[in-house]
Image (cartoon, coloured by chain):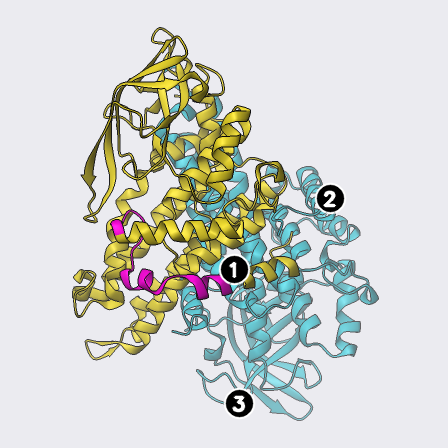
Chain colours: A yellow, B cyan
Amino acid sequence: MNFSFTTEQEAFRTEVREFMEKEVPSRWRELGYGIWEEDDESWELTSQWVKKLGQKGWLSLTWPKEFGGQERSHIYQLILDEETARVGTPSGIESMITIGWVCPTIMVFGSPEQKETILPKASKGELIFCLGYSEPGAGSDLASVTTTAVEEGDEFILNGQKVWTTIAHRADYCWLVARTDLDAPKHKGLSMFIVDMKTPGIKINPLTNILGFHSFNEVFFDNVRIPRKNLVGQKNLGWYQLAMALDHERSGVGSPAAMDRMLHELIRYCKTTRRDGKFLADDPSVRKRIARLAVEKDVLRMICYRVTSVQEKGGVPNYEASTAKVFTTELMDRFANTVLDILGPYGQLDRNSRLAPFNGLFVRQFLHSPSSVGGGTSEIQRNIIAMRGLGLPRG
Amino acid sequence: MDLDLTRDQKILFNSAKEFLKKECSTSLLREMKDDANGYPPKMWKKMAELGWPGVMIPEEFGGMAGNFIDLVLLLEAMGEVNCPGPFFSTVVLGALPVMNAGTPEQKKEILPKIADGAMIMAYAMNEAGIHYDASFVAMPAKADGDAYILNGTKLFVENAHIADLILCVARTEGVPGSKDGLTLFMVDGKSKGVRTSMLTTLAFDKQCEVVFDDARVDKDRILGRPGKAFEIIETLTEQAALAKCAEMVGSAQRAFDQTVAYAKERKQFDKPIGSFQAIQHHMANMIMDMDGARFMTYRAAWEMTRDLPSASMSASMAKAWTGNATHKIALLAHQIHGAIAFCEELDLHLHYRRTKAGSLSFGDEDYHLEKVARHLGL
């Protein structure tokens, strides 16, 4: 049992922290954007930032050397995630998808050619994927997707629709699941494809999210021709490959560090702000609510460290990663909601409103909260915890 | 970073569980509930042979020289079976403050006896008008020649009825509410002027009301400096709070394990109830509470072994979380078992009782949240 970091690991933390403090563009701080908030300007900042990380080799920190990685242990990834979250860097949803989900699966199931075309570029931040998973009729029941890919000579012909496709309008490729066997049971007729987003027949329709931004889309595929070499792994085994990709989801192990930062700012605010005749910090109920957030934040930290500790020993976290995801998203929700309660009427003031505390950070966070359904709802995560973690029978 | 137990820790933990499986059966728990002493001396003797009471006591005093993590693991194993007896009051509330504040002579006198299982201790701080804050101790200790005379009533003193030595907090100066003026007396449990009577409690533990009626204590029977006990008490409360977490973690873990097994085996609507999402989601919540409680406790214990300044806040965080988390686990264990768990025959109610009792001891959630708030600079 050991809860500390080695001297080398601490040195890496210092290196990352100094880099972040120096390099995060001041314009990004002015914008104050979080995830699922983007426009052309923030996208530009984000792409430059991701490339910068790529140049440092920090996108492929844990990758094997043969794919251009540094083969650092998962603790280094944790440290990088923590320091990234602590500073609040240009948002990383795109690198999370590409680096966190897609690339590890390509390393296992991809052809030599796929590895060669995708991995080096992705590790430099020069190539971005979007995820073609959800459809109008397939959300939590993902295996019921109806987009079809019919084999024809050396190609697959893709027809159907995807939805909630984050950054489809900016991505180079779509990591897509489609039905390749209409007669097989639903889990056994799926395949994974790498789809070039410039292929003719793809139509993208923007959707505006509740934060007021265009981040996700509807994507329509009308007789889109995918070369056979872009099939990932084996035909009709896509579901199992996809399940493995979900295991690799990095579940935001850095989020407690982001909460550290938010708590710090909140405490400073409460110590200097008088309401109803006293400082907020002197109100017993405010003290208790903040202390509880701090405790829950550390519980989350332990759950995240648990994930890393499992990975460190060569294990693939399954239920641990799901607990981290559920706890993170539900705590983020409680966090933002609690802060708005503490702020009272000022809790309504959104970004760029003259009197908004924290420039509306927690209003934005509050609006982010319902996005917790992304990557598998909390209910689906709880099913995974129960069935895979505890061995309870499938319902 | 590695959150798993080391090889030695695993050996200690597993051998403790093995021992308790044999020695601390559920029928024993039922006997002890109504037993006047509340524990089987034979089991206590065997624990002493294994070195348990001396787990943290230095070798020179006959102990195992282990650290706080070792203590936590023993307590967790005891928590799993809701083990009755004088371990907590003797080791956590007795040996630790003596190790922390005793003179070399006092250590030499007391610690070897504890390590041998030959001395049972109790800790008397609480009194009417106090929940957790020792600065409100009012009980006076008046100097009288070479001795002090103690008068007053102490509450929630576990195992006072069998204690050879009672550590009693009394006021030698100042007024209630003041941290100064508190003194820790080592009172012979069998001495004249000390009367104990049993409180009827939720978890069938043996907590006493202790009346000190002109109890005479020699002036050299003081732990630490006269009037300066508050700091010792603070440290002790922190250690005791964390030690309670370990017990609660063990107790909740057993309730949880039994519930997983039951959910796989119990059938309704022709299916194991564990296949229903309503049950699965309860159990997913339980494991999150469980993992949170366990690793918050381990982290604080690990920090204590290294004397890190953060240990104090970590212990309060662990206690603030673990009480409520383990209560929820025990309650859901009942819920998932249904009516069978409402029967005395099943052990679940013991876990339900123990986790709550632990939560109310040495600082409840509110108390520790306020401590956390202060650590945060609020």
Q: Amino acid at mark 3?
A: Glu
B171 with respect to A148 (left or right)? right
| Category of crowding for the residue at label 1, using alpha-carbon neighbours closer than 10 angstroms: few (below 14), some (14–19), many (at least 20) | some
Asked whether residue A229 appears in the rendered view, the answer is yes
Q: Position of residue A241 (x, y in %)?
A: 47, 24
* Bounds of the magenta segment: A18-40
| Category of crowding for the residue at label 3, using alpha-carbon neighbours closer than 10 angstroms: few (below 14), some (14–19), many (at least 20) | some
Q: Nearer the viewer, residue A274 or A244?
A: A244
Residue that badge 2 annotates: B11
Task: Determine which of the numbered discs, if any, sits on residue B173 in the image.
Answer: 3
What residue lies at 78% left-to-right and 78% top-to-bottom? B104
Q: Chain of mark 1?
A: A
| Category of crowding for the residue at label 2, using alpha-carbon neighbours closer than 10 angstroms: few (below 14), some (14–19), many (at least 20) | few
Residue that badge 1 annotates: A16
Tell me the element at label 2: helix
Q: Are marks 1 and 3 in contact (CB under 8 Å)?
A: no
Labels 2 and 3 in the same subunit: yes
Tell me the element at label 3: loop
How far is disc 1 from disc 2 in space, using C-alphas?
39 Å
Corner quadrant of residue A291 = bottom left
Q: Does A89 appear in magenta?
A: no
